[in-house]
Image (tube, rainbow, N blue to C red):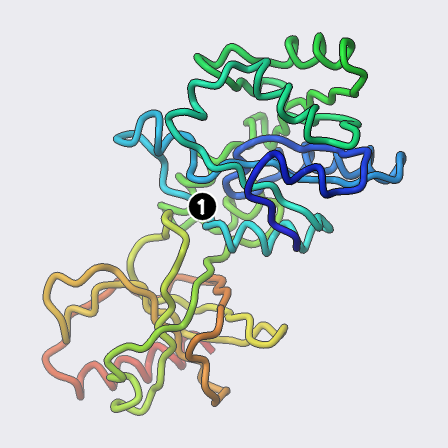
């Protein structure tokens, strides 16, 4: 996937450009419809579909004390976009100066950088620009003036509820992966890089991969049956999401995964992990032998 870091860099892409614009945290079913509209326009006009998003999340700049826990980090987002067939992402840096940019000026920048601008696709209720002055009506006005199409995609509803990142966060926080998956349009997963740990699992006879997870919204702490994507294959695993109270004091939550029927070196590799079933809450044991016995039971339960 080609990742651009400035609006000006759009000029390097073959037009007409079909821009899907939004925050897209989680890339849920509603976001997918916005992106699909841009893809269809690009296919019809032999242009290039581009997802335009912002880094960091605008709420981190505008109201940091109320900023949401991210459903996926930038690299996880890129992976999901790549799976959807998007080949280009514009990751606009979002700063206090960006927040002060008038809505018309933001669109003018997109128009001038594109060669040419074919369409802009957004959620129908999306607002943008200084003081959120931009909306679908302004986009349609500018589209008529400058000759680009505008798609205002209506909300996606499931069971009478509008799909939103907020509902997905709530579901994940409760460990309701079925509901989260129905809103995402795919099974929920977390993503990160395997880093070196204390190697305690190896000493106990159950080597684990310590995953530095990029996702901020995590399910409840505990032990899970899981699946891990290794070299394009989903393998069964046992995952411990917790603070490891038996061996540490007041540690930050971490994710360790054990693959019972696999051996190899995963250090430095990116892993995607799907939680399939909650097995038990995290517990503090009276020594490593007791912990070792419980790990055996966890593996058997996961299988």
Q: Position of residue 81 (x, y in %)?
A: 64, 49
Q: Position of residue 74 (x, y in %)?
A: 49, 50
Vertical order, 220 against 154 (above or below): below
Position of 269 compared to 108: left or right? left
Q: Secondary structure at mark 1?
A: loop
Q: Circle 1 is placed at which residue position?
A: 71
Which is more toward the observer, 116 or 75? 116
Vertical order, 8 against 135 (above or below): below
Q: Residue at left 61%, top 36%? A: 52
The count of marks equals: 1
Asked whether residue 37 appears in the rendered view, the answer is no
Position of 173 compared to 125: left or right? left
Q: Residue at left 70%, top 11%? A: 142
Vertical order, 264 against 140 (above or below): below
Which is more toward the observer, 200 or 161? 200
Q: Residue at left 60%, top 45%? A: 4
Asked whether residue 271 appears in the rendered view, the answer is yes
Q: Position of residue 115 (x, y in %)?
A: 78, 32
Which is more toward the observer, 11 or 63? 11
Q: Position of residue 295 (x, y in %)?
A: 30, 81
Which is more toward the observer, 172 or 231? 231
Position of 157 compared to 217: left or right? right
Q: Residue at left 67%, top 55%? A: 83
Position of 3 compared to 68: left or right? right
Quarter occupied by the N terminus: bottom right
Q: Residues within 10 Å of mark 1 (few under 14, many from 20)?
A: many
């Amino acid at each position: 996937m080609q990742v651009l870091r400035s609006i000006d860099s759009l000029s390097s892409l073959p037009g007409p450009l079909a821009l899907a614009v939004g925050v897209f945290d989680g890339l849920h079913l509603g976001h997918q419809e916005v992106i699909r509209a841009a893809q269809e326009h690009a296919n019809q006009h032999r242009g290039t579909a581009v997802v335009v998003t912002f880094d960091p999340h605008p709420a981190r700049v505008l109201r940091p004390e109320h900023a949401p826990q991210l459903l996926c980090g930038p690299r996880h987002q890129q992976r999901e976009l790549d799976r959807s067939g998007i080949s280009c992402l514009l990751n606009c840096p979002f700063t206090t100066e960006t927040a002060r940019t008038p809505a018309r000026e933001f669109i003018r920048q997109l128009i001038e950088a594109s060669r040419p601008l074919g369409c802009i696709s957004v959620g129908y209720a999306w607002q943008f620009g200084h003081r959120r002055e931009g909306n679908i009506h302004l986009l349609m006005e500018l589209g008529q003036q400058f000759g680009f199409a505008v798609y205002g995609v209506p909300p996606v509803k499931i069971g009478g509820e509008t799909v939103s990142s907020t509902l997905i966060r709530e579901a994940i926080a409760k460990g309701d992966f079925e509901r989260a998956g129905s809103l995402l349009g795919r099974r929920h997963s977390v993503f990160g890089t395997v880093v070196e740990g204390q190697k305690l699992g190896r000493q106990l006879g159950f080597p684990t991969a310590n995953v530095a997870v990029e996702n901020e919204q995590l399910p409840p702490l505990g032990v899970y049956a899981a699946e891990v994507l290794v070299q394009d294959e989903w393998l069964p695993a046992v995952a411990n999401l917790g603070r490891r109270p038996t061996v540490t004091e007041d540690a930050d939550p971490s994710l360790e995964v054990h693959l019972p029927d696999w051996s190899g070196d995963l250090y430095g590799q990116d892993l995607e992990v799907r939680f399939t079933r909650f097995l038990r809450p995290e517990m503090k044991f009276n020594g490593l032998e007791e912990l070792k016995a419980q790990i055996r039971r966890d593996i058997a339960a996961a299988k």
